Structures are given as C-alpha cells and as structure tokens.
Image (tube, rainbow, N blue to C red):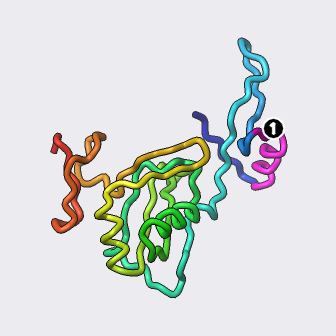
Amino acid sequence: YAFLLFQEESSVQALIDACLEEDGKLYLCVSSPTIKDKPVQIRPWNLSDSDFVMDGSQPLDPRKTIFVGGVPRPLRAVELAMIMDRLYGGVCYAGIDTDPELKYPKGAGRVAFSNQQSYIAAISARFVQLQHNDIDKRVSNCLGYNHCGKEMKFFCGPLGRKAFCDHE
C-alpha cells in the first residue's frame, strides 16, 4: 500500500485522468527497474463520502449508534447507510471512520438509528454481510473492549453493549 496526499484537488483529478479504467476500477501503469508498466490500482477517496445523513429531521442519539468494524475501504457512507437501512430500517446517519492525518478510510464506520427497534435489531444481529464490488466481508457491529483481534464469541447488549472474546 501507498498513500499519496495532494495539496490540490486538480492534482488528484490529473492522476485519475492518467489512469486506465477496467471493470469500474482505476489503474495506473508504473515501471520499476525490474518490472515495466505494472498496473497498480488507484483508489481515490472523496472526502464528502465519509458522512451521509439519511434523515436530517432526526437528531443523532449516541445511545442508538453502533460501531461497524471490517468495512471494505472503498465503501462510501451512503452505501453503508443503504445496506443497514435495508436490513434494519430507521437509519438516520452513517459515517466512515477516516485516518485523522491521511483522511483515508480505516475500515470501520458508525451507523445511527432513529428508533430503538432498529437499533436493537442491528445489535441483536451481531454480524452483517457487506459486499462492495469484489469485496465480501462478514463484519461485527461491535469490536468490544480490550479487543485482541479475534472474532467475538460473546456479545452482551444488555450489559452496556460489551463484546467479549476468549482472551479478555
């Protein structure tokens, strides 16, 4: 992986314009001393894709907001909102967590619900299948406390929305 930061949006557009498009993906041919014209995938991130308000009339309630880990990096907030709304209804906001310095997705997000019923349905499901192009992930909606990187075995919503693995 490599992350490029540009001062000007026009530089990002120039990079995109220099790319080849194949199956909806962008590639730039890069040469090195050992390889000539190797296609390297370019994944630009539009900063406005980090947040999506689905229902602006609803106030955001942190008590009805879930964390979603394992989000495919190309997935936009609007897509996360649509997936979760289709599954559980009542989505009023979705956000993609980005690195504070790089402003690129970290692979996690947040979804706020407008009602308790949708929120409970989402946390009760524990896992959701997120698909984006050729990426298909089964992700947990909460990584819990002291998460060691292993899949959560126990999820206890009534006890403060804590998730536990065998190593805690």
Q: In this figure, what is the number of numbered marks?
A: 1
Q: Which residues are magenta?
A: 9-22
Q: Main secondary structure of the magenta part?
A: helix
Residue at 28 percent across and 40 percent down: it is 150
Above or below, comparing residue 162 to residue 35 in the picture: below
Camera-side residue of 21 and 32: 21
Spot occupied by residue 67 in the image (x, y as percentages of width and height): 37, 60
Residue at 54 percent across and 43 percent down: it is 135
Q: Quadrant of the N terminus?
A: top right
Q: Amino acid at mark 1?
A: Leu
Crowding around mark 1 (Cα neighbors within 10 Å: few <14, some 14 to 19, many 20+) is some
Q: Is residue 16 magenta?
A: yes
Spot occupied by residue 165 in the image (x, y as percentages of width and height): 20, 45
Q: Is residue 103 left or right of residue 60?
A: right
Q: Is residue 117 left or right of residue 89?
A: left
- Of all residues shown, which one is farthest toward the top? 34
Above or below, comparing residue 119 to residue 109 in the picture: below
- Of all residues shown, which one is farthest toward the bottom? 57
Q: Quadrant of the C terminus?
A: top left
Camera-side residue of 16 and 130: 130
The quadrant where residue 110 appears: bottom left
The quadrant where residue 144 appears: bottom left
Residue at 71 percent across and 52 percent down: it is 7
| Mark 1 residue element | strand
Spot occupied by residue 4 in the image (x, y as percentages of width and height): 65, 42
Above or below, comparing residue 135 to residue 162 in the picture: above
Identify residue for label 1: 20
Q: Is residue 34 magenta?
A: no
